[in-house]
Image (spheres, grey):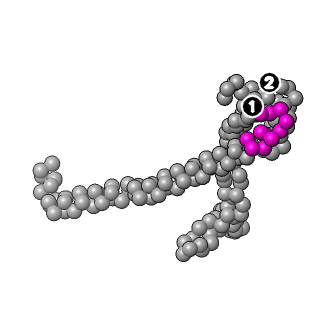
Amino acid sequence: MKKMLEQIGIKKTLILFAAGLCLIFLSLPHSETKKEESEEEVTEAADEQQEVKALEKRLVETLSTVDGVGKVKVMITLKSSKESVLNKDMPYEEEEETDGESTRKSVNNDEETVLIEKDGENVPYVIKELEPEIEGVVVIAQGGSNASVQKDITEAVTALFDVSVNKIKVLKMEDGS
């Protein structure tokens, strides 16, 4: 090892070592980017929670006015989160390659996201926003033991949220709740 260092030279060895450290440092992910992404995810999750709470509140207000339902508590769970559909550009390119006797055609179908300038930044062009998909709804009502009330609640939830009947559960509220 000592002979190798003498042949290469200490200065060159130190330069190679420093270059290696620089490469390692540059290949590490930047914590600022990760921090910004995690803050954005937390904000999106909080917004989604607020939307769910608002839906639950509106459903409680609506169902509590139905005859026979009484006091109501509601829980809504989501299957998916809000999703943005981006505009994609699919340029069509055809290439011909000839190698003496044969000709080969190839088609390039690469997708590219369309970007627009917004506040001085290039951001993806969003075509539409898909609302979160509701997984299930639980309704706890004072009149939840009555079959007619259960049917009315189930039909109302199905009409409002396009949720299948098997994803809705109506329960009787405990006395004193």
Residue 145 is marked as 2
Pinpoint residue 84: horizontal percent, then vertical percent: 67, 57
Tell me the magenta residue range. Answer: 60-70
| Image location of residue 154, percent across then percent down | 82, 35
Q: Mark 1 points at which residue?
A: 141
Q: Looking at the image, how many numbered discs can be counted on the residues?
A: 2
**x 74%, y 26%: residue:** 172
- Disc 1 residue type (three-letter): Ala
Q: Is the magenta stretch mostly helix, strand or loop?
A: loop
Q: How far apart are marks 2 and 1 (CA)?
A: 8 Å
Q: Which of 29 and 167 is in front in this view?
A: 167
What residue sits 71% from the left and 52% below the top?
Answer: 131
Residue 1 in the image: state x and y as whole percent.
15, 48
Q: Is residue 96 visible?
A: no
Q: For numbered disc 2, what is the local secondary structure?
A: loop
At horizontal 28% and vertical 57% (from top left) the residue drawn is 21
Looking at the picture, which amino acid does disc 2 mark? Ser
State yes or no: residue 31 in magenta: no
Q: In which quarter of the image is the C terminus?
A: top right
Specify whether 129 is left or right of 2. right
